[in-house]
């Protein structure tokens, strides 16, 4: 059985930097975080407080996607030109063929590149939505992650000096001209402060804020015309996707909000008592709307499992720590990093995980937080009614939904179907019927749920390299035991009870994953073999020439069962 204690948990050092009592920071403090003295958090010099700025960003996002908000005609025409040509070519050559989604994805990606930072950012979010968006779209848009040309250093210097109100040389003794990362909204440079600390400086692109506002308005105006005309995930149709995107990107345009996100998530981690995940310290003074100076952290890239293991780091424990920290933030405190992916995480040499880039951070009100908690508890005990009620309370279903009718129409009370026992045609029919029923009930994918699911899918996928041979069922029990031991009283008071480890429906988990009670353990390798089989069958249904692939996958799946 897997140990239920928090892995890699270094004890809190009372003799360390005093801000470790406030947040999960590194013990080697370049400065001390004292939120009450950070002037950028409060109203001053005509600037509102961080709380007001957050409210203003939410209001702006709602305004930009409102039907009565008229977009820029010039920008709409530009978008129509850039997207219209690839859509016309796709409609004439690939629509309705087995290559429909792949062809559309291949044509849209360069169009997004030409349209600039806003569309590149949208493509990057889609690229990290494996399991939410079509596989072809995710795979193609993954190329947008490293194709953003940096702005010239002269422009970077001008932005930094304008926002800090001082020449660069008065703040930094050195400032690397070549960025260490260049993304759609900002780029990141290494630098050294005049006080001697090595830092990271995040600098917003000079013209991105007005362009984002123009693009969101244009997207919102165009999105309704795309409904039913392009193959996107059914519950993230174009208007809903634009609304969700607006809520996330508008807040990213003010780095003071990101710095506050860093403090809040660091405080959550400290409140849980664990020190397995750390947050870089934002600078006490050098934070503005377009410039964010923070502690410089180092470590292994998230995908370098071999390097970590060679250094003696238990990568399975690293993954478990990351999952527990994420779930505690979401379920217990209602705040979590909303964009987990390999570029936003690194593993330090002591095995602790460093989180980066807090521009997308989910904040749950008390009702939604408890709905997430009920959703997870319902999943543990295989309580379908509790899960559907929780999804309703999260906004995935209308508030007046008939829960019993939803369960009946979606056949949720029947035992899970093993997709490997279905033909390709039967699998397609099952997906079509479920999608049709969900849309009939007005189902949608709200922002917080999308970010939560996206993070869970990313951490699940990380098992491929970090912990391919770890027993998934053992991990489920370990995490449930951890939550009972550390948060059981609170969970019981909020939702009326906890799920004991011996009450967990492991057979339900096995069935949901497509395995029988004969499978005492299930590893990621086992799960991946089944996924490959299912994918191959669907591909064979789409294209006869791929049936050989399906047969090979079927053989790979069956062969281990014979030995």
Image (cartoon, rainbow, N blue to C red):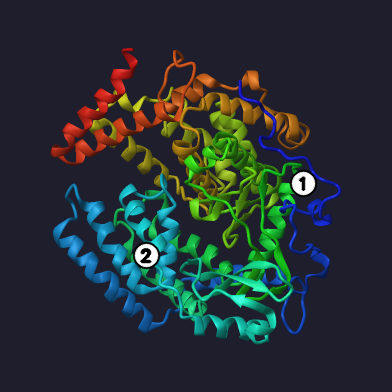
Res. 248 image quadrant = bottom right
- In the visual, does 141 lie left or right of 412? left
SS for callout 2? helix
- For image coordinates 47% across by 25% down, the residue present is 413
Identify the image quadrant of the N terminus: top right
Residue at the (77%, 64%) spot, across then down: 31
Q: CA distance from mark 1 to mark 2?
A: 44 Å
Residue 85: image x %, image y %? 22, 70
The quarter of the displayed image where residue 110 is located: bottom left
Above or below: residue 353 compared with residue 17 = above
Question: Quadrant location of the C terminus?
Answer: top left
Q: Return the residue at label 2.
A: 224
Q: Name the residue at 59% across, 33% down.
A: 386
Q: Position of residue 142 (x, y in %)?
A: 37, 56
Label whose residue precedes the other's in the sequence (1 or 2): 2
Up-down: is 547 above or below 234? above
Residue at left offset 68%, top offset 80%: 171
Percent x, y of residue 40: 73, 74
Comparing marks 1 and 2, which lies closer to the viewer?
A: 1
Name the residue that disc number 1 marks: 271
Mark 1 residue element: helix
| Residue occupying the far right of the picture | 15
């Amino acid at each position: 059985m897997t140990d239920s204690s928090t892995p890699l948990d270094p004890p809190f050092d009372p003799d360390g930097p005093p801000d470790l009592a406030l947040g999960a920071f590194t013990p080697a403090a370049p400065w001390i975080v004292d939120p009450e003295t950070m002037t950028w958090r409060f109203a001053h010099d005509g600037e509102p407080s961080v709380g007001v700025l957050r409210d203003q960003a939410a209001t702006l996002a709602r305004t930009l996607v409102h039907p009565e908000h008229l977009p820029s005609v010039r920008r709409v025409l530009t978008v129509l030109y850039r997207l219209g040509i690839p859509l016309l070519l796709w409609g004439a050559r690939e629509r309705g063929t087995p290559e429909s989604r792949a062809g559309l994805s291949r044509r849209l990606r360069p169009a997004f590149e030409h349209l600039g930072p806003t569309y590149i950012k949208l493509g990057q979010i889609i690229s990290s939505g494996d399991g939410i968006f079509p596989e072809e779209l995710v795979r193609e848009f993954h190329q947008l992650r490293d194709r953003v040309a940096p702005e010239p250093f002269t422009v970077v210097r001008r932005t930094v000096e304008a926002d800090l109100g001082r020449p660069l040389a008065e703040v930094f003794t050195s400032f690397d001209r070549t960025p260490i990362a260049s993304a759609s909204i900002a780029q990141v440079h290494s630098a050294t402060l005049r006080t001697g600390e090595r830092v990271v400086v995040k600098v917003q692109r000079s013209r991105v804020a007005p362009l984002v506002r123009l693009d969101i308005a244009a997207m919102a105006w165009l999105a309704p015309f795309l409904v039913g005309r392009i193959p996107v995930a059914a519950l993230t149709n174009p208007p809903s996707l634009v609304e969700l995107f607006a809520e996330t990107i508008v807040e990213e345009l003010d780095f003071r909000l990101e710095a506050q996100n860093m403090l809040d998530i660091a405080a959550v981690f400290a409140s849980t008592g664990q020190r397995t995940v750390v947050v870089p310290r934002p600078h006490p003074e050098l934070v503005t709307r377009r410039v964010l100076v923070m502690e410089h952290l180092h470590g292994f890239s998230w995908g370098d499992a071999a390097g970590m293991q060679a250094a003696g780091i238990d990568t399975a424990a690293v993954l478990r720590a990351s999952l527990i920290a994420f779930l505690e933030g979401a379920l217990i405190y209602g705040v979590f990093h909303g964009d987990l992916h390999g570029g936003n995480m690194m593993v330090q040499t002591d095995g602790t995980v460093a989180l980066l880039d807090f521009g997308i951070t989910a904040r749950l009100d008390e009702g939604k937080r408890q709905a997430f908690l009920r959703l997870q508890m319902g999943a543990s005990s295989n309580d379908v009614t509790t899960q559907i009620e929780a999804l309703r309370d999260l906004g995935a279903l209308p508030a007046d939904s008939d829960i019993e009718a939803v369960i009946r129409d979606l056949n949720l009370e029947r035992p899970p179907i093993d997709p490997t026992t279905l033909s390709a045609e039967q699998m397609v029919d099952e997906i079509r019927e479920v999608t049709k029923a969900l849309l009939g009930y007005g189902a949608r994918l709200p922002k917080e749920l999308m970010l939560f699911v996206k993070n869970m899918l990313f951490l699940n996928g990380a098992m491929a390299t970090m912990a391919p041979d770890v027993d998934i069922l053992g991990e489920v029990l370990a995490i449930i035991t951890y939550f009972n031991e550390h948060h059981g009283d609170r969970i019981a008071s909020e939702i009326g009870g906890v799920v004991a480890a011996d009450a967990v429906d492991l057979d339900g988990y096995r069935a949901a994953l497509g395995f029988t009670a004969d499978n005492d353990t299930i590893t990621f390798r086992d799960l991946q073999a089944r996924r490959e089989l299912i994918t191959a069958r669907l591909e064979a249904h789409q294209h006869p020439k791929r049936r050989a692939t399906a047969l090979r996958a079927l053989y790979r799946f069956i062969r281990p069962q014979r030995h």
